[in-house]
Amino acid sequence: MKKTVSVIGLGNRGTEYMGFLKAFHSSRVAICALCDLRQQALDDIAPKYAVPKARQFLCAEDFFAQGVLSDALIITTQDASHYEITKQALLTGYKLILLEKPISGVRQEYLELRDLARENGALLIICHVLRYSNYYSKIKQIISSGQIGDLVSINHTENVGYFHFAHSFVRGNWRDERTSMPSILAKCCHDIDLIAWFMDAPCESVSSVGSLRYFCKEHAPDGAAPTCMGGCKAKKSCPYDAEQLYIKDPFYKAKFIKYMRRTLTGKTRSRKRDVEAALRTGDYGKCVFLNDNNVCDNQFVTMTFRNGASAVLQMNGFSDKMFRECHIVGTKGELVGYGNKLTLHIFGGKSERIRTGFIPSGHVEGDLRLIAGFVRLLCGETTDLTDVTTIDATVISHDIALAAEESRKRGGAPVALPD
């Protein structure tokens, strides 16, 4: 008999995970119930998975009122709702939950969820998908092997991409920390999780500086209008022109946001005129300099660890491409990573390019491997939780991110991490 999964939140991440379950695991797993605030989303998606009307819900309260509907639950709603929905899931009796990150921007809340999971015998897995990619797993393996000796430092940069940052953190759902999270938590808890995982030692102190440097009214060009399609006289020279990014850019540029039509229109199938209408009236057509965004577009975080090593994380919202880079230094050698390319240098010895073997790498590969691991746990094919990103691991990255925000707001003053 197939194992069953319910999904709360039918946005990009939720539907992607459902697609992976159907494409690669349909012989063992079936989607049996869906919940989303938007009727359009339910109407569009439920038929693809043969989910009956009786198992479609427009609010989490109605969903949980039915009791436990499935063997596992995936929660991929907006950040600010994660705590309440996950708490209700645990209290209702779900024993295997996959929760999109971040959990919460309030420490008391994510600690409460950790304790509830323990008390109820539930496994709460957080989607720190980069850990699951072969590339980052290989880095962890090399560090653990001792080939580069004891860790001295990690320098890691998250290059968000100018178009991606504008899409998600200036125009999109993560632009306002009052309804989402600070960008260092919303975007970089992946990266902080990796650093803490590599270090394998408690973080003792954090300091941070950063700001909303550019996406504000002081930098609006002459002739700027509230919307890109509302008579803006600076369109032709602005790299953030929404019409160019979402409609006009040719295929060879292929920025992923060009294909985010459902995000813009709310419709699974959208025509060009639907996108144009959305850009005239919706958030994604707003001027990036005349918007209501308030999250940092650049930030540095310095971390010291109990093993004597240190780390620096840079979040950069202004790169031309989306990629991560890292430089990991040990007492006997170093690792240099750029995108999905990894090179090992042993001091006084050999240097070699390390093959990580999977294309595409990074987030997509991590998503695929996360879902595969989730299915193995669901089907009882493994009980091995080694390097599974349970909430216990996530508490560490969230503590560091919140300490970084506290330090930034205090002008970079060091902040001690809680025991």
Image (tube, rainbow, N blue to C red):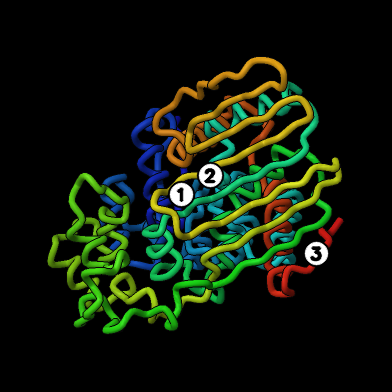
* Residue depicted at x 21% and y 44%: 252
Q: Are marks 2 and 1 in contact (CB under 8 Å)?
A: yes
Q: Nearer the viewer, residue 216 or 257?
A: 216
Q: To which residue does mark 2 refer?
A: 72
| Residue type at tag 3 | Pro
The residue carrying pointer 1 sits among few (fewer than 14), some (14 to 19) or many (20 or more) residues within 10 Å by Cα, namely many
Discs 2, 3 touching: Cβ within 8 Å:
no
Q: Is residue 371 above or below residue 149?
A: below
Q: How many marks?
A: 3
Q: Is residue 389 above or below residue 382?
A: below
Q: Which mark is residue 6?
A: 1
Q: Position of residue 307 (x, y in %)?
A: 85, 40
- Helix, strand or loop at mark 1: strand
Front-most of residues 39 and 200:
200
Which residue type does callout 1 highlight? Ser
Between the C-alphas of marks 2 and 1, the distance is 7 Å
Which residue is the site of mark 3?
414
Q: Quick one: SS at disc 3? A: loop
Of marks 2 and 1, which one's residue comes earlier in the chain? 1
Give the quadrant of residue 116: bottom right
- Crowding at dot 2, Cα within 10 Å, few <14 / some 14-19 / many 20+, comes out as many
Between tags 1 and 3, which lies in front?
A: 3
Query: On the rendered image, what quadrant is the N terminus found in?
Result: top left
Q: CA distance from mark 2 to mark 3?
A: 41 Å
Q: Is residue 296 something one can see in this rendering?
A: yes
Q: Provide residue 263's location: percent of width, then percent of height.
A: 31, 61
Image location of residue 143, percent across then percent down: 71, 28
